[in-house]
Image (spheres, rainbow, N blue to C red):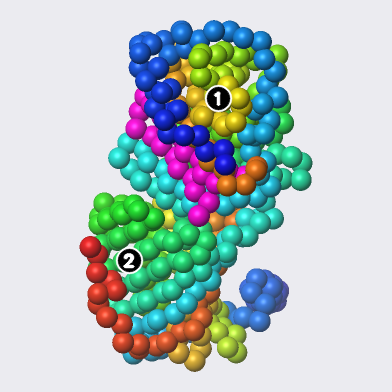
Amino acid sequence: MRIFPIRSLLYLSLVSLMMGCNSYQHLQKIRLSDQCLQKFKPAITRALYRTSVDVIGKHISGMLLIKTMPDSSTRVVFSNAMGFSFFDFGFSKGNEFKVYQIISQMDKKALIKTLRKDFELVLFRNMQEKNRFTLTDSAFIYYGFPQEKGVNYYITDKNCAGLVKMERSSKRKPVVEAVMTFNDESVPDSISIRHLNFNFSITLKKS
Amino acid sequence: MLKYSFGILGIVLALTVKAQYPGFALLQNQETFKQTFNSATKNVSGIKSDFIQEKTLSMLSDKITSRGNFWFKRKNKVRMEYTHPFPYLLILNGGKIYIRDGQKENKLSASSSKIFEQVNRILLDCVGGTVLKNPDFQARVFESPGSYLIELNPVAKNLKELYQKINIFIDRKDFTAESIDMFELSGDHSSIRFFNKVLNANIPDTLFAIP
């Protein structure tokens, strides 16, 4: 229902290409509430996804469990098919993040930071109203939420009919692109995260 | 006095072991078991079975249940095909490992990923009866009227970082694995239970062919 046409994605990519170094230079600032985004925010009580992680030629597959805990925190647990856990992350209110468990092979500061930021983007976390800004071009609205470094963008069409994609950007250009599809109203059917500056992607599918 | 101290220590140890696995007692003569186990499993040329796997996430109070079909052919062939919740195929054939996950295929050789080979060898050892020969673990054997319990404690450094211990329940009747419980350091554990077992079934080699 909220899957956005591929044509729109192509258009976005084309615009980004035409703008050269700064992907956001062509955008105009506008004042707009972020009410529109609320309907795209994943409301996951418990969801299990078939998961593939491809990183610099290595492929890891397994299952990713996303679960909202009674204290409203969100746990993200990735394990292989035989049940062995690779990592268990917790995201709680106030942008708190905790590594409950991670295997030694993945226990690298840079990797944990990358995974944390990727999940924060797709789980709609760190969306503080205070510094929020909105940009637009002829077709899309960019809801920007500044992070410690860079900005998380949630990009919708002008009528707020669909979430076209999410981006984590540096000052000038996107470094991560993420797309979600929905079959029902609140739980994403699939989530894909792709890093643009190195070969790293995460794909989650419910079936 | 010293004699009494040893006696009390012996009783305490015995009670501890008993409390650890209710209904099971530590087998005194492990060597005899090894020999019986070894010769009994040699008579099993193949196993066809269904399985249910349950991963218990202790801190999340959650369980992930998977199920599928399992084939073993002596001496080093295993096919484990998950059908639920997601399709996933694992084939171990000699020193080769094949994984198909959706559209993705992955082929590994035992030497290319030591840890992967070690983890998969556990599976092969458990059903093939060679588990007590695996130098990566120290084993203790317990018995109950219906089952044996082989407790594997990792001694290899990299396995120590993954598992606290692995318990294999062996059916006393035919010496085949009833279930495998893998305990992770985090407190989570996964249990694979085999059922609808057919021993010495005619299993074609093509099932284990790595494309």
Identify the subunit bearing mark 1: A
> Which residue does the numbered mark 1 point to in the structure image?
A157
Viewer-nearest residue: B158 or B186: B186
Q: Is B211 in front, or is A92? A: B211
The residue shown at (67%, 77%) is B22
What kind of element bears circle 2? strand
Residue at x 63%, y 60% (from the top left corner): B63
Q: Mark 2 points at which residue?
A: B91
Asked if A51 appears above or below A123 in the picture, the reply is: below
| Residue sitting nearer the eye, A38 or B130 | A38
For the residues marked 2 and 1, what is the alpha-carbon distance in whole angstroms? 46 Å
The relative height of residue B145 versus residue B82 in the rendered view (above or below) is below
Of the pair A137 and B139, the residue shown nearer to us? A137
Residue range (magenta):
A187-207
Q: Which residue is drawn at 45% across and 43% down?
A: A203
Q: Magenta stretch: residue B185 in it?
A: no
Rendered view: A137 above or below A56: above
The residue under label 2 is which amino acid type? Ile
Query: Is residue B100 something that shows in the picture?
Result: yes
- Which numbered mark, 2 or 1, is in the foreground of this view? 1
Q: Main secondary structure of the magenta part?
A: strand
The percent coordinates of residue B99 (x first, y second) are 34, 58
- Asked whether A189 falls inside the magenta stretch, the response is yes
Q: Is mark 1 on a helix, strand or loop?
A: strand
Residue B36's quadrant in the figure?
A: bottom left
Dot 2 surroundings within 10 Å: few (below 14), some, or many (20 or more)? Answer: many
Q: How crowded is mark 1: few (under 14 residues within 10 Å), some or many (20 or more)?
A: some
Place of residue A29 in the rendered image (x, y in percent of width and height, measured from the top left): 58, 8
